Amino acid sequence: MAVTRSRYRTASSAGTLVVFLLVLIFGSPWYVDWVNSGNRGLFLETLAWPAWNFDTDQSVRDLLAADLKAILLVLFTAVFITLLVGAQLASARGTISAILTGWAAYIFAAALAALITAFLLADASVSSAVVNATGGAGYGLIVGWIIGLASMAGRRP
């Protein structure tokens, strides 16, 4: 039995790889510190939203919530892109459809990751979770087009 490899990436694997790189690079403590040190503009400041860190000065709850938010963002994006790309109709498989699919998956993933991890914070409430989910959806709206382009580049089933 021969194992063959395709040279083409699927839409979900291409989108997930780009999400992983975005979270790894732009959520890093070094980038977040750079953004917070001055006025860098809306886009560069928004890129730092899923900030992960390993600072020992923060409480364990806040560290766990921040790191889990970044991990869940990657996982939820992979799941949502897979579900949304598989649901596309044959007549809707175009460039615009692929971009919107990746973009929508990223908005949903960011909002859900923020909603879930908000309950780990010290002053957790339903209203604060909804506010955090709104921030995640805003992040997905501003940054999600990158994931849409990446998922467009991959082949769809």
Image (tube, rainbow, N blue to C red):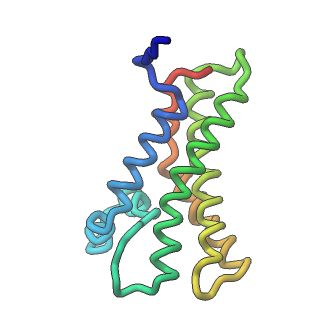
Residue 47 locus on image (x, y percent): 41, 57
Q: Examine the rendered structure and indicate whether residue 134 appears above or below residue 87.
A: below
| Quadrant in which residue 105 is drawn | top right
Tell whether 100 sits left or right of 21. Answer: right
Residue 152 locus on image (x, y percent): 51, 27
Q: Nearer the viewer, residue 1 or 38?
A: 1
Q: Nearer the viewer, residue 39 or 93?
A: 93
Residue 139 locus on image (x, y percent): 52, 57
Q: Residue at x 61, y 74 (%)?
A: 118
Q: Examine the rendered structure and indicate whether residue 111 appears above or below residue 128.
A: above
Q: Examine the rendered structure and indicate whether residue 67 appears above or below residue 147.
A: below
Q: Residue at x 52, y 66 (%)?
A: 68
Residue 10 locus on image (x, y percent): 51, 26
Tell whether 128 sits left or right of 15. Answer: right
Count of marks overlaid on the render: 0
Quarter the C terminus occupies: top right
Q: Residue at x 32, y 73 (%)?
A: 36
